[in-house]
Image: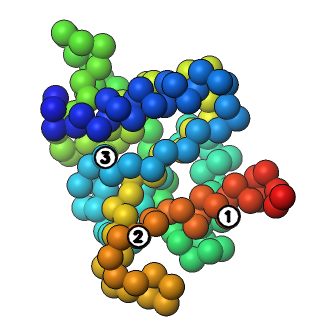
């Protein structure tokens, strides 16, 4: 589906990143408008294949006042991205396309790699101190705080 060609590029990037057997892979992308419908413009949905990472990243996000919200990688929905003519469908229609898209990406991880995906809007609507209206680094402060705690300050 050419409506979701960015997912194909990201899928390749995830597989390539996993070839080196990293400790963790994190990606940021705008996959669906459903993310905004579900959580609004200020809270990016987070998908991860690790409960510990979800808890630790959520705690780090709260600490830096940049919330993220974990969404489910509901495995029974995999049937929705199955295809009779391809390995997977890269774009399934709403409702639920936010989850289907994350499941699609998860399919390209290798070696049981820990993974986090943030479905970012990357735009500040309201403007706050240090965060003016316009293009934004949605989720970046939260992930940076998480990485500092996980790997220690150097």
Q: Quadrant of residue 103?
A: top left
How crowded pointer 2 is (Cα within 10 Å; few <14, some 14-19, many 20+) is rated as some
Where is residue 36 drawn, in percent x and y?
28, 62
Looking at the image, is mark 2 or mark 1 earlier in the sequence? 2
How crowded pointer 1 is (Cα within 10 Å; few <14, some 14-19, many 20+) is rated as many
How crowded pointer 3 is (Cα within 10 Å; few <14, some 14-19, many 20+) is rated as many
**30 relative position to 63: left or right:** left
**87 relative position to 24: left or right:** left
Q: What's the residue at 79%, 51% (across, down)?
A: 151
Which quarter shows the N terminus? top left
For the residues labelled 3 and 2, say whether their Cβ atoms are less than 8 Å apart.
no
Where is residue 117 drawn, in percent x and y?
48, 46
Q: CA distance from mark 3 to mark 2?
A: 16 Å
Residue nearest the observer in this picture, 64 or 18: 18
**23 relative position to 68: left or right:** right
Residue under label 2, please give it. Answer: 136
Q: Quadrant of residue 63?
A: bottom right
Residue nearest the observer in this picture, 81 or 3: 3
Q: What's the residue at 49%, 24% (across, down)?
A: 15
- 118 w.r.t. 4: above or below: below
Give the label on residue 145, or none: 1
Give the label on residue 31, or none: 3
Give the label on residue 120, or none: none
- 56 w.r.t. 9: above or below: below
For the residues labelled 1 and 3, say whether their Cβ atoms are less than 8 Å apart.
no
Badge 2 marks a residue whose secondary structure is loop
């Amino acid at each position: 589906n050419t409506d979701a060609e960015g997912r194909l590029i990201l899928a390749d990037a995830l597989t390539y990143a996993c070839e080196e057997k990293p400790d963790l892979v994190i990606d940021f992308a705008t996959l669906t408008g459903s993310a905004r419908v579900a959580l609004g413009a200020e809270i990016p949905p987070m998908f991860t294949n690790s409960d510990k990472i979800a808890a630790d990243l959520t705690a780090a996000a709260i600490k830096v006042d940049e919330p993220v919200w974990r969404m489910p990688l509901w495995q029974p929905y995999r049937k929705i991205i199955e295809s009779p003519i391809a390995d997977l469908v890269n774009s399934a229609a709403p409702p639920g396309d936010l989850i289907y898209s994350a499941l699609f990406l998860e399919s390209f991880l290798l070696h049981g790699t820990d993974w986090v995906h943030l479905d970012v809007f990357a735009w500040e609507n309201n403007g706050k101190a240090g965060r003016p209206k316009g293009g934004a680094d949605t989720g970046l402060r939260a992930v940076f705080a998480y990485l500092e705690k996980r790997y220690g300050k150097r």
